[in-house]
Amino acid sequence: MGYVAFGAQVLLCVTFAVAAVAKLRDLAGFRESLDRLLPLAHTLPAGTRMTAAAVVPVAELTIAALLVVPGAATIGTVAALLMTVGFTAVVGLALRRGDRAPCRCFGASERRLGPQHLVRNVLLTVFAALGLAGGATEPAGLLVAGFAGVVGALLVVWADDIAGLFGPGPAYRR
């Protein structure tokens, strides 16, 4: 595995783990977001919607776990690629419908869904694709790539908060 692939896998592992834990901490809030983002989701019984909402963070935790298991990292990266493509499609369709529900991707954020979330998901999809790259590696390079992956993941996770530093504007609910 190459440095870029390793760094991308670390970024994905941390991002998916943080996203899963945040969703599980506020599963009801995440379910409300899904109700708004997925057409017809509100027609399902409440128990079914809650179960469906729980599937996403469980899948994210599974992906994060696969990414740390040496023999399963490629499977985890492919799963991350598929998941990020799905997330990108859901956000893109919601934005096209004009839905500006709060993004609960990383917890109880009040930041409304916007183009920045679409960009973030496209970038995560690119990192997932990069995670499939191969190549020779040295331990020092892996350490640097892993550190870069963690820093990148933190930037992804805190993207809404960082954007808020530059002016809350109309992106927050009032």
Image: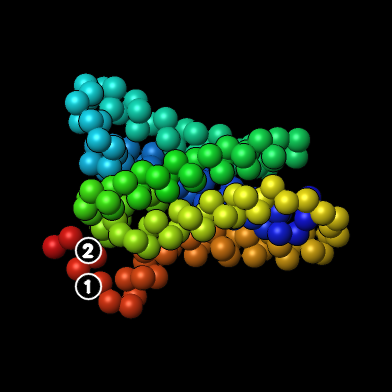
Front one among 90 and 163: 90
Image position of 76 (left or right of 161): right
Give the quarter of the image for residue 166.
Answer: bottom left
Residue at the disc numbered 2: 172
Image position of 125 (left or right of 30): right
The crowd level at tag 1 (other Cα within 10 Å; few <14, some 14-19, many 20+) is: few
Tell me which amino acid carries mark 1: Gly
Total numbered circles: 2
Which residue is rendered at x = 42% and y = 35% of the image? 56
Tag 1–tag 2 contact (CB < 8 Å): yes
Which residue is rendered at x = 64% and y = 65% of the image? 148
**41 to 92, vertically: above or below:** above
How is colour applied across the structure in the image? rainbow
Q: Is residue 22 visible?
A: no
**40 to 127, vertically: above or below:** above
**160 to 78, vertically: above or below:** below
Q: Residue furthest front?
A: 96
Which residue is rendered at x = 86% and y = 55% of the image? 136
Which image quarter holds the C terminus? bottom left
Which residue is rendered at x = 70% and y = 35% of the image? 72
Q: Residue 139, percent across and down?
A: 83, 59
Q: Residue 141, percent across and down?
A: 79, 64
Tell me which amino acid carries mark 2: Tyr
Q: Residue 169, percent across and down?
A: 22, 73
Image position of 153 (left or right of 170): right
Front one among 147 and 84: 84
Q: For residue 16, which numbered disc appears in the image?
A: none
The crowd level at tag 2 (other Cα within 10 Å; few <14, some 14-19, many 20+) is: few
Q: For residue 169, which numbered disc appears in the image?
A: 1
Give the alpha-carbon distance from disc 1 to disc 2, as whole Å: 7 Å
